Image (cartoon, grey):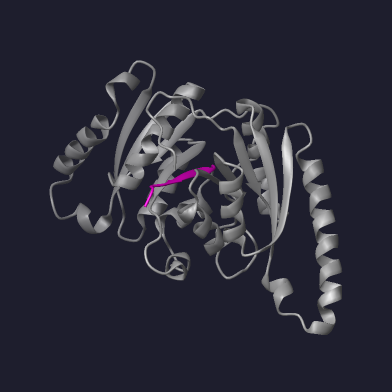
């Protein structure tokens, strides 16, 4: 993934909007359009039909499946042409594995941002749901803007982020996301909060005030000196509760702080992909599913 220096403007020349035409995907559409207008981007609207719907038909049904796929392509193209009217765009359609197809689109069209909508739950093979959505943002070589069911509809015109929250555990992944959070803060002239949540299991081991003071210093040290004149950064250290996961506390803080964008760094998958995508409650997936604002995830290069 391309790196970004603090203070540099993000270039979003090509934006990929992936949709299964569900209400959840439709929630993400205004964000893709608003970002395209603000950054002068070209939008690639993509619909991927799952291959299993077509690969396991009996031979006598092949002709009907071919006609069905052609009808689906024409219908999908017509819908996307209508949805993307008013911005430079190109419609993409393919049958296959959802992530493999989207990955090829990202590489072929040099995508700078992928925009998806998801309800965040598992147990369905819909295009952008649950574990499939997590597979996308954990493997994408470009930033991914995920719009969950609790996010508000974006304005029809220019999108404005006023309160940006970066949740960090001081790992390489979240540090890689920091320059994007700083750049967006400068771009929109908004507030930026750096948040670290201490897990409940660690909170009671040592003196809480001492831990909080030390972590606050670490958060402040993350902000480069050149960003201080224009970047209004607020540092926050919160302690998790025994009954809650860190993701829940992050979502609560984002809601109470009226964040309209959460920025997260995510690690690339390790081991078999299925192991990663079927973990029931990863922090990033929980945040995407529960957040009351869009979530921008950036994957550290493996």
Front residue of this view, candidates 175 and 11: 11
- The residue most toward the front is 108
Q: Position of residue 273 (x, y in %)?
A: 45, 66
Q: Where is residue 291 in the image (x, y as percent from the top left)?
A: 51, 48
Q: Does the magenta stretch include residue 298?
A: yes
Q: Is residue 108 magenta?
A: no
Front residue of this view, candidates 253 and 161: 161
Q: In which image quadrant can residue 224 be found?
A: top left
Instruction: Name the image quarter holding the N terminus.
Output: top left
Figure check: 96 above or below 240:
below
Horizontal placement of 54 versus 193: left or right?
right
Horizontal placement of 132 versus 192: left or right?
right
Q: Where is residue 151 in the image (x, y as percent from the top left)?
A: 58, 44
Q: In which image quadrant can residue 294 be found?
A: top right
Q: Where is residue 220 in the image (x, y as percent from the top left)?
A: 26, 30
Magenta region: 293-302
Front residue of this view, candidates 15 and 30: 15
Please give the name of the residue rendered at 46% of the width and 51% of the height, measured from the top-left corner. Answer: 287
Figure check: 105 above or below 35:
below
- The residue most toward the top is 229
Front residue of this view, candidates 238 and 94: 94
Please give the name of the residue rendered at 70% of the width and 53% of the height, measured from the top-left corner. Answer: 23
Please give the name of the residue rendered at 68% of the width and 43% of the height, measured from the top-left corner. Answer: 44
Number of numbered discs overlaid on the protein picture: 0
Please give the name of the residue rendered at 28% of the width and 54% of the height, measured from the top-left corner. Answer: 199
Horizontal placement of 173 versus 162: left or right?
left
């Amino acid at each position: 993934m391309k790196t970004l220096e603090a203070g540099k403007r993000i270039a979003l020349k090509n934006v990929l909007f992936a949709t299964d035409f569900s209400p959840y995907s439709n929630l993400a559409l205004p964000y893709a359009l608003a970002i395209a207008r603000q950054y002068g981007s070209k939008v690639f609207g993509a619909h991927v039909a799952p291959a299993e719907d077509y690969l396991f038909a009996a031979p006598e049904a092949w002709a009907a499946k071919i006609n069905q796929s052609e009808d689906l392509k024409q219908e999908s193209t017509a819908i996307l042409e209508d949805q993307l009217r008013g911005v430079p765009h190109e419609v993409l359609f393919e049958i296959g594995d959802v992530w493999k197809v989207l990955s090829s689109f990202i590489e072929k069209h040099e995508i700078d941002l992928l925009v998806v909508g998801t309800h965040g739950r598992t147990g369905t093979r819909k295009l952008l749901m649950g574990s499939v959505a997590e597979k996308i943002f954990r493997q994408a070589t470009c930033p991914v803007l995920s719009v969950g069911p609790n996010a508000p509809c974006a304005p029809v015109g220019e999108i404005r982020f006023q309160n940006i929250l970066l949740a960090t555990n001081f790992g390489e992944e979240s540090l890689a996301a920091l320059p994007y959070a700083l750049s967006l803060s400068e771009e929109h002239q908004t507030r930026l909060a750096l948040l670290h949540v201490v897990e409940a299991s660690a909170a009671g081991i040592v003196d809480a005030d001492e831990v909080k003071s030390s972590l606050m210093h670490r958060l402040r040290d993350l902000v480069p000196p050149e960003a201080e004149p224009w970047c209004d950064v607020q540092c926050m250290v919160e302690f998790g509760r025994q009954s809650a996961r860190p993701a829940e506390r992050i979502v609560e803080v984002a809601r109470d702080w009226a964040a309209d964008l959460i920025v997260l760094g995510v690690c690339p998958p390790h081991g078999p992909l299925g192991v990663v995508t079927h973990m029931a409650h990863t922090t990033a997936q929980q945040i995407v599913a529960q957040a009351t604002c869009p979530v921008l995830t950036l994957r550290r290069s493996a």
